[in-house]
Image (cartoon, grey):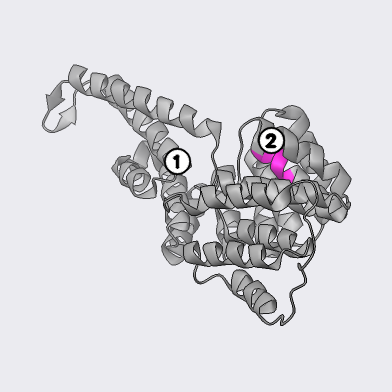
């Protein structure tokens, strides 16, 4: 995952605990004809595996999660199995297989909020934003307060350009779950998309202060600062983004290069783009900006002194991330 989320440490701890519980339960189990004799113990073990599989998906270990979901019995855990397997397959980009599973699941569980959300996620991933929105709306008919369905509905509204409609949903989610940095980030992004950069900044900063170091946080703050004319702050946050997440996203390099270009530091912008293309050689945005800069025949940074930050500090920071190994 392209973010340093403190919640990942919590997921690792939960996985470790669940593995211990599963091992203990398996030791306690008496196997008769290949099956656990105690039905209650067997159900407990299945529930533990279900929880572990979902955590694997949260961690991005889709193969491991999918393998565990395949072990779950259809009779007692059909809805969870359809949902978990489909989620893994979507993330692994096996969209046709995921769609078949979700359609089968909805035939058996037509009022399943998780499966309707899953179908919405699939359509959103495929670029069918309005169809995705309709599935999230259907999910909310059966579970009006489901946080996943509400959040995904807001994302779909943003995809469709209805930022003013997404804002109240995200505001409510942030008010109800104030310590969820993902909601804070998305609210910031929505304010930014709605043309309200000043309103976006506190939410980006709060999420960042919680340790949620996602490329979108740095990109959002950079754009917000630039929009309101705080160019020094924009360049600072662009530099920090690359320092913290050198392999996070090509847009981080594009932002820093654009910031350097804004100050007239063309040579430094070239260096940033060179490093960005080493890490993301196929990125069209970086290639386009590099061509724009290379097409310049003059030297716009001649006799200019960079304000506040200074070329020395810029050089130090660039040198730090240039020496980092990929991965």
How many residues crowd around disc 2 within 10 Å: few (fewer than 14), some, or many (20 or more)? many
Give the magenta range. 182-186
Does label 2 or label 1 sit earlier along the sequence? 1
**Residue 303's disc number:** none
Secondary element type, mark 2: helix
**Residue depicted at 37% across the width and 43% down the height:** 65
Is residue 299 or residue 134 the one in the foreground? 299
Q: Which residue is mark 1?
A: 59
33 and 323: which is toward the camera:
323
Magenta span: predominant SS is helix
**What residue occupies the far front of the structure in this picture?**
303
Determine the residue positioned at 76% across, 68% down.
302
Q: Is residue 29 magenta?
A: no
* Separation (CA) of disc 2 from disc 1: 19 Å
Q: Is residue 90 left or right of residue 147?
A: left
Q: Which mark's residue is nearer the viewer, 2 or 1? A: 2
Is residue 104 visible in this depiction of the protein? no
Residue wearing tag 2: 207
- Position in image of residue 112 (x %, y %): 56, 44
Instruction: Using the rendered view, name the quadrant where residue 151 is placed.
Output: top right
**Corner quadrant of residue 298:** bottom right
């Amino acid at each position: 995952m392209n973010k340093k989320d403190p919640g990942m440490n919590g997921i690792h701890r939960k996985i470790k605990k669940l593995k211990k519980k599963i091992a203990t339960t398996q030791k306690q189990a008496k196997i008769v004809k290949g099956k656990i004799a105690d039905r209650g113990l067997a159900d407990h073990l299945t529930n533990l595996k279900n929880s572990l599989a979902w955590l694997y998906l949260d961690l991005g270990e889709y193969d491991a999660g999918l393998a565990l979901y395949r072990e779950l019995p259809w009779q007692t855990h059909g809805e969870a199995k359809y949902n978990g397997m489909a989620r893994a397959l979507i993330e692994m980009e096996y969209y046709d297989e995921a769609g078949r599973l979700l359609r089968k699941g909805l035939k058996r569980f037509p009022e399943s909020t998780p499966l309707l959300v899953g179908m919405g996620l699939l359509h959103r991933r495929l670029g069918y934003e309005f169809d995705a929105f309709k599935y999230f709306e259907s999910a909310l008919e059966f579970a009006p307060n489901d946080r996943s369905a509400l959040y995904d509905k807001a994302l779909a509204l943003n995809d469709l350009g209805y930022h003013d409609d997404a804002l109240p949903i995200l505001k409510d989610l942030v008010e109800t779950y104030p310590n969820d940095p993902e909601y804070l980030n998305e609210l910031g992004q929505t304010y930014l998309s709605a043309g309200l950069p000043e309103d976006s900044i506190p939410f980006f900063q709060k999420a960042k202060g919680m340790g949620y170091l996602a490329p979108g946080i740095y990109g959002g703050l950079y754009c917000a600062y630039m929009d309101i004319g705080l160019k020094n702050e924009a360049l600072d946050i662009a530099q920090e983004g690359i320092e913290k997440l050198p392999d996070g996203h090509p847009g981080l390099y594009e932002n820093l290069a654009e910031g350097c270009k804004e100050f007239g530091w063309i040579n430094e912008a070239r260096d940033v783009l060179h490093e960005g293309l080493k890490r993301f050689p196929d990125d069209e945005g970086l290639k386009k900006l590099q061509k724009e800069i290379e097409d310049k025949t003059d030297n716009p940074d001649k006799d200019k002194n960079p304000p506040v930050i200074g070329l020395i500090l810029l050089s130090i920071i660039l040198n730090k991330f240039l020496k980092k190994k990929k991965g």
